[in-house]
Image (spheres, rainbow, N blue to C red):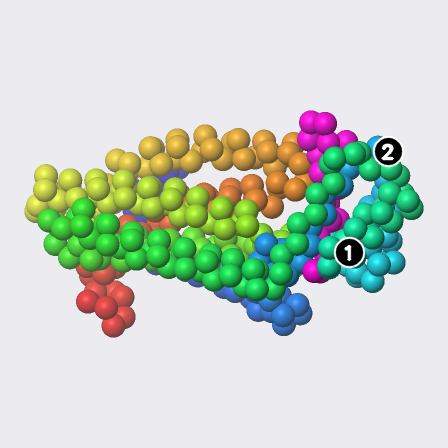
């Protein structure tokens, strides 16, 4: 049943094709979103100009009622999400285009006068100007690039006694990029189908996934390094596969324990946290997959000269 585990490296081309298909679907979703909305993701207020309202009513109100108040204020298609949690009955989060503090206060007054009274002291309004949104976007991009450079340098330093140590760092970064494409594609697809937005929590999920993915990859690479010293005459393809099998249980146990918790949150958690947890779940799933089926097989492909223009 699990014979494929003993031929992971031998079947590397199948995994490359599988990943290419998943990434291609994500890219198509990003292209579709770009054509229809002008952005590859459904961007939240943290990455663009906008205003976020958090209000709690004393009595039950409807989503449609909240929308009508915003529409009357000249704001079309606001994002309205019910907030669920302890002591958060009748609480709502609304995201809209950027409005001035004066307009925001008028909207809050209208919500209270036209719907139900608000719970005193619970209303929060956060606005992000276009310049701040652009700065957050640049910071997110720089954070990922710096992480890739640091990771490459770190692995090359740790594996300095291994022949062709640059390959280990480059393969780890390639697996990381693979995971970034997977979660970016997932974010684009959920944005198109479910209306989920990419906000600051998405960046948190990305950096968390990068950390977990690299941890798994480095564990496998470290076992490859140990086996090279122990079995210098063993065929490299077989040695890499042996190393994967010796470490796969650790990766699966660590990741599955976290994924079970995420599934529980997805099933029973509040709506506001679901996009973050879903991206984190898919990212960790991809990270586990890439450390086993992408990063290590890439080393073998590189060793056998299968990567074009790279030797």
- The percent coordinates of residue 17 (x first, y second) are 41, 60
- The magenta span reads 80-98
Would residue 91 be counted in the magenta stretch?
yes
Q: Are marks 2 and 1 in contact (CB under 8 Å)?
A: no
Which of the two residues, 288 or 280, is positioned nearer the viewer here? 280
Q: Is residue 66 magenta?
A: no
Q: Secondary structure at mark 2?
A: loop
Mark 2 highlights which residue?
A: 59
- Which residue is pictured at 73% across the width and 55% down the height? 101
The local crowd at label 2, few if under 14, some if 14 to 19, many if 20 or more residues have their Cα within 10 Å, is few
Against 307, residue 230 (above or below) is above
Q: CA distance from mark 2 to mark 1?
A: 26 Å
Q: Secondary structure at mark 1?
A: helix
User: Which residue bears the numbered disc 1?
Assistant: 102
Q: Residue at x 59, y 33 (%)?
A: 265
- Residue projecting furthest to the front: 102
Q: Answer with left or right where residue 65 lies relative to residue 123.
A: right
Q: Position of residue 48 (x, y in %)?
A: 61, 61
Of residues 129 and 222, the one drawn nearer to the viewer in this rendering: 129
Q: Is residue 198 above or below residue 215?
A: below
Q: Residue furthest left?
A: 233
């Amino acid at each position: 049943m699990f014979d494929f585990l003993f031929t992971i490296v031998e079947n590397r081309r199948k995994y490359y094709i599988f990943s290419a298909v998943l990434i291609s679907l994500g890219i198509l979703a990003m292209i579709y979103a770009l054509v229809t909305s002008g952005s590859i993701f459904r961007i939240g207020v943290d990455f663009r100009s906008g205003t976020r309202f958090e209000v709690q009513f004393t009595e039950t109100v409807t989503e449609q009622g909240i929308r009508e108040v915003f529409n009357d204020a000249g704001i079309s298609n606001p994002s309205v999400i019910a907030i669920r949690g302890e002591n958060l009955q009748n609480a709502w989060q609304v995201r809209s285009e950027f409005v001035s503090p004066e307009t925001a206060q008028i909207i809050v007054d209208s919500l209270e006068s036209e719907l139900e009274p608000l719970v005193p002291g619970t209303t929060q309004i956060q606005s992000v100007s276009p310049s701040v949104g652009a700065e957050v976007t640049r910071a997110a991009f720089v954070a990922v690039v710096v992480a890739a450079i640091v990771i490459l340098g770190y692995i090359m330093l740790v594996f300095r006694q291994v022949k062709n140590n640059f390959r280990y760092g480059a393969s780890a970064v390639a697996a990381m990029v693979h995971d970034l494409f997977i979660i970016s594609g997932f974010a684009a697809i959920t944005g198109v189908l479910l209306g989920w937005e990419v906000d600051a929590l998405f960046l948190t999920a990305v950096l968390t996934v990068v950390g977990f993915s690299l941890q798994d990859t480095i564990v496998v690479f470290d076992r490859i390094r140990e086996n090279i010293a122990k079995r210098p005459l063993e065929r490299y393809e077989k040695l890499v596969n042996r190393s994967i099998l010796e470490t796969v249980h650790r990766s699966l146990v660590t990741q599955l324990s976290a994924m079970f918790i995420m599934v529980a949150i997805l099933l029973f958690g509040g709506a506001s946290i679901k996009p973050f947890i879903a991206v984190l779940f898919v990212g960790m799933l991809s990270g586990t997959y890439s450390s086993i089926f992408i990063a290590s097989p890439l080393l073998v492909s590189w060793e056998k000269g299968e990567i074009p223009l790279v030797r």
